[in-house]
Image (cartoon, rainbow, N blue to C red):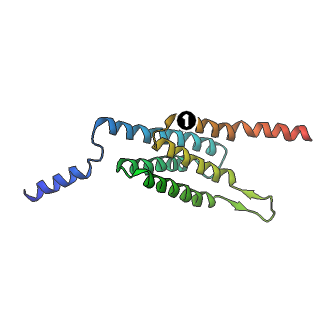
Amino acid sequence: MDVWQVILYTLISEFSDLTDVEQATRVALRLLVAAVLGGLLGFERESHGKAAGIRTHILVCTGAALFVMGSELVEGGDDAMSRVVQGIVAGIGFLGAGTIIKGERMDDVKGLTTAAGVWMTAAVGVCVGLGLEATAVLATLVMLFTLNVLPHFIDRMDKNED
């Protein structure tokens, strides 16, 4: 084998992780679903003027899905998957903590909902990565309800108390 054949063979083998059309379709679909669901959640946050918007939520959701799929594709097993998910939860917790700002007063805290939203978006990504797309869609709907509809009920209750 000459040098060019070795280089070509090496390139081909390095890009052979998607072994068939079914697997490539599954990976592409999961990444697309994660990006769309993350984008929906990010759009909701961005439309309310929050710092963590569309791009952040797409990256968090798709990244979480990719970490899980990567572990699955190398057949890491349940222990490896558990460590991957634990790492995502801890890492996103650290990212979310950066969005929380505490003021002088005890009740002056901002960014908790944003931090929780980014954390939940990662959970949606993990579900997509595991192939639980229906669960991820349902969780996204629950999250959108929580962020959009629930505040109106709370405002009504507060007005009725006055």
**Residue 113, horizontal then vertical, whole percent:** 68, 50
Closer-to-camera residue (115/130): 130
**Residue 160, horizontal then vertical, whole percent:** 89, 37
Q: Residue placed farthest to the right in the image?
A: 162
Q: Which residue is mark 1?
A: 137
**Residue 97, horizontal then vertical, whole percent:** 63, 60
Closer-to-camera residue (128/58): 128
In-image side of 20 versus 89 (left or right) = left
Looking at the image, how many numbered discs can be counted on the residues?
1
Residue beneath the point at 59% across and 39% down: 139
The amino acid at mark 1 is: Val
Q: Residue placed farthest to the bottom in the image?
A: 104
Q: Say few, some or many: other residues with alpha carbon within 10 Å of mark 1 (under 14 / 14 to 19 / 20 or more).
A: some
Assign the N terminus to one quadrant of the image: bottom left
Quadrant housing residue 155: top right
**Residue 13, horizontal then vertical, whole percent:** 22, 51
Q: Is residue 75 above or below residue 100?
A: above
Q: Residue placed farthest to the left in the image?
A: 1
Residue beneath the point at 47% across and 38% down: 33
Residue beneath the point at 11% across and 59% down: 3
Residue beneath the point at 39% across and 48% down: 72
In-image side of 158 versus 79 (left or right) = right
Assign the C terminus to one quadrant of the image: top right
Quadrant housing residue 5: bottom left
State the SS at label 1. Answer: helix
